[in-house]
Image (cartoon, rainbow, N blue to C red):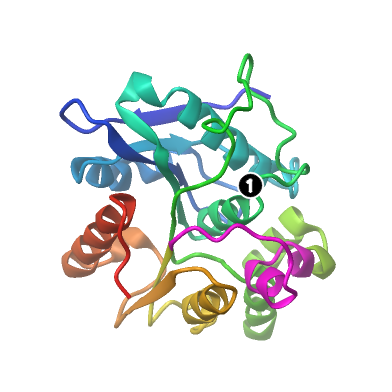
Amino acid sequence: MPLKALIYRPAGEGPFPAVVCVHGGAWVAGDRFATQGFAERVAQTGIVVMAIDTRLAPQHPYPAAVADVNCATRWLKHHAAEYGADPLRTGGLGISSGGYLVLLSAMRFDDPRYCQEKPANLPLTALTDARMAFVVTCSGVLDPLARFALAEKNGNLAITLCHRAFFRNPQTMEEANPPLILSRHEKADLPPALFFQGSDDPRLPPDTAAKTAAAWRKAGGRGKAILYPETGHAVGTWRRKELADMLSRLHELASGSLSS
């Protein structure tokens, strides 16, 4: 199934860091246009942004969308020179459910289940695998099982239905669960990571970002949670101060450093 993407290129020659940018929508809605204003802001900081479509549930349940992120990462790294991007500084940026997709793809970049989509004439060399140099999530649904339990407790039928449409059952939410993968000591790649969350986010357990960052560090990776006070779920509602801070931290990480 052919999917499309929008590529935002900074002014100048580069090479620039790059991100595969994945929209939210609870795995059942959204497309490459959903992140348009956000992606433009990211590109203005000096990062090439490839905002992608993914296949959507219920027609395409897990792991289809994870495979789409994996495929897009390989495509962007292979075509990096055409867009002034550096394939060795290519990472993932995901919002809400898109944060889950980029994080899982980063952790299991060589999992056969996620490598099944193969772009035409794309050689699997060291520069065109799906390994990410870094990963950033904003309001990421990083623990889908915990989010499902919260939605059930609050009677949020819309969220529970979206989870069931994508994962089909709680057992899959547990198997394909980034913090639980780490707690089970399973094989996982751990690129430097930033996890952003609002303190007033009603759609996530309040410890989602902090719990994931702690598990990331315990497993040997460099990860940091940033909690913004009085901030909700949708990035479009974040105040100018929080958005500017997030963009600054993203650029710092993409450029090759992560403060402790």
**Depth check: 60 or 44 in front?**
44
Q: Tell me, yes or no, whether the highlighted magenta stretch contains residue 225.
A: no
Q: Which residues are magenta?
A: 173-192
- Residue 129 lies left or right of residue 111; in this view the side is left
- Circle 1: residue type: Phe
- Asked if residue 101 is positioned above or below residue 155 in the image, the reply reads above
Quadrant containing the N terminus in the rendered view:
top right
- Figure quadrant of residue 117: top right
- Asked if residue 14 is positioned above or below residue 143 in the image, the reply reads above
Residue at horizontal 52 percent and vertical 44 percent from the top: 30
Residue 29 lies, in percent from the top left, at 57, 47
Quadrant containing the C terminus in the rendered view:
bottom left
Residue 25 lies, in percent from the top left, at 54, 53
Residue at horizontal 51 percent and vertical 58 percent from the top: 99
- Figure quadrant of residue 193: bottom left
Residue furthest to the top: 121
Residue 196 lies, in percent from the top left, at 39, 69
Determine crowd level at label 1: few under 14, some 14-19, many 20+ residues with C-alpha closer than 10 A: many
- Residue 124 lies left or right of residue 220; in this view the side is right
Judging from the image, what secondary structure is the residue with disc 1 in? Answer: loop
Residue at horizontal 75 percent and vertical 34 percent from the top: 116
Residue 42 lies, in percent from the top left, at 27, 46
- Asked if residue 90 is positioned above or below residue 3 in the image, the reply reads below
**Depth check: 195 or 154 in front?**
195
Name the residue tied to disc 1: 109
> How many numbered circles are shown?
1
**Depth check: 79 or 123 in front?**
123
- Asked if residue 80 is positioned above or below residue 61 in the image, the reply reads above
